[in-house]
Image (cartoon, rainbow, N blue to C red):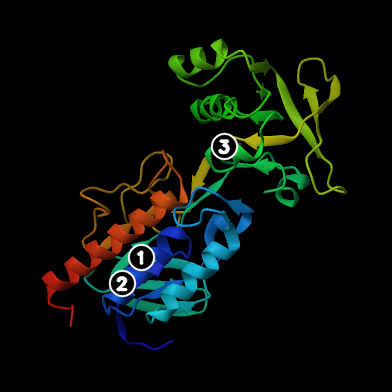
Amino acid sequence: MSDSIRKVVIVGSGAAGLTAAIYASRANLKPVVIDGSLPGGQLTTTTEVENFPGFPEGIMGPELMERTRKQAERFGTEFVFDQVVDVDLKSDIKKIKLAQGELQTRTLIIATGAAPKLIGLPAEKKLMGRGVSTCATCDGAFFRNADLIVVGGGDSAMEEANFLTKFAKKVYLVHRRDTLRASKIMQERAFKNPKIEFIWNTTVTEIGDIAKNEVSYARLKNLQTSEERELPINGIFVAIGHTPNSAPFASQIGTDDQGYIITEDGTKTDIPGVYAAGDCVDHVYRQAITAAGMGCMAALDAERYLAAQGHDD
């Protein structure tokens, strides 16, 4: 890693980061992408992706990210397998401290994504993409005529449950309390949906069957009576929120009370030359295609900033 000042550094290598890299490298800005702890982002943890344009037969998530990465490499993107430890964004030259070195750059694109919160069961990660999901709009169509569980009590859980009834035979909404955090309108929609059954004061204590590499049941525990039972299901959707991966930057750029990076006028943060894209910003849509679109926007915003500063040669 050289000590030269880069024009564009992109933190994150999911759909947003890699799309930003494609646009920046085609603009001859010689971007550097810092891979982070999960190269390829959340799509590498999924199986088949059917809703990304251009793939009528669908494509596996890891393959989609690998293709996008090769596309960025083809135009000259440099990749660094490392993680951001700290940043100094106060001057025109931004300093990015890594676990194994430091980068200096004139513009920074933050595309670090967000991590879905999980229940904490061993089977969750092992069966992710094989019956366990954190995104109904991504995976719902794979569960036609299925019996499903949605875990959660907020707006996201209500939205996921309602969406899944388009495909599923039955949706059990499991919540650890006897009241919901969701907005009244979202609650009413869920209560009125005949395919949704609420299971109150209950947690999921086990998901099976790991041995079969598929979801076939969930063990439920009533928190008031301590009674446990096994419920046969075909899939489980965890909708208890996301945590944006913004921690290394949060002390220097604007974030909301949940840690999502605040942007205005496209992808601009409150620091000139610093942009943010994808799920570290977006807590509404959280789709690969919207993340990719924001990555494009961030690269174009960075390119225009560099041109205005006279550094686009």
Residue furthest toward the right?
211
Residue type at mark 1: give it: Ala
Query: 121 and 71: which one is in front?
Result: 71
The x and y percentages for residue 242 are 52, 42
The residue identified by callout 2 is: 24
Mark 1 vs 2: CB contact within 8 A:
yes
Query: 289 and 92: which one is in front?
Result: 289
Mark 2 vs 3: CB contact within 8 A:
no
Crowd class of label 1 (few under 14; some 14 to 19; many from 20; radius 10 Å): many
First in residue order: circle 2 vs circle 3: 2
First in residue order: circle 1 vs circle 3: 1
Crowd class of label 2 (few under 14; some 14 to 19; many from 20; radius 10 Å): many
> On the rendered image, what quadrant is the N terminus found in?
bottom left
The x and y percentages for residue 309 are 13, 73
Q: Is residue 253 above or below residue 83?
A: above
- Residue 301 lies in quadrant: bottom left
Crowd class of label 3 (few under 14; some 14 to 19; many from 20; radius 10 Å): many
The x and y percentages for residue 187 are 51, 16
- Residue 193 lies in quadrant: top right
Residue type at mark 3: give it: Ala
Q: Secondary structure at mark 1?
A: helix
Identity of the residue drawn at 39% across and 38% down? 257
Q: Is residue 197 above or below residue 129?
A: above
The residue identified by callout 1 is: 20
Residue type at mark 2: give it: Ala
Q: Is residue 261 visible?
A: yes
The residue identified by callout 3 is: 136
Query: 89 and 268: which one is in front?
Result: 268
Identity of the residue drawn at 49% across and 21% down? 182
7 displayed left or right of 279? left
- Residue 293 lies in quadrant: bottom left
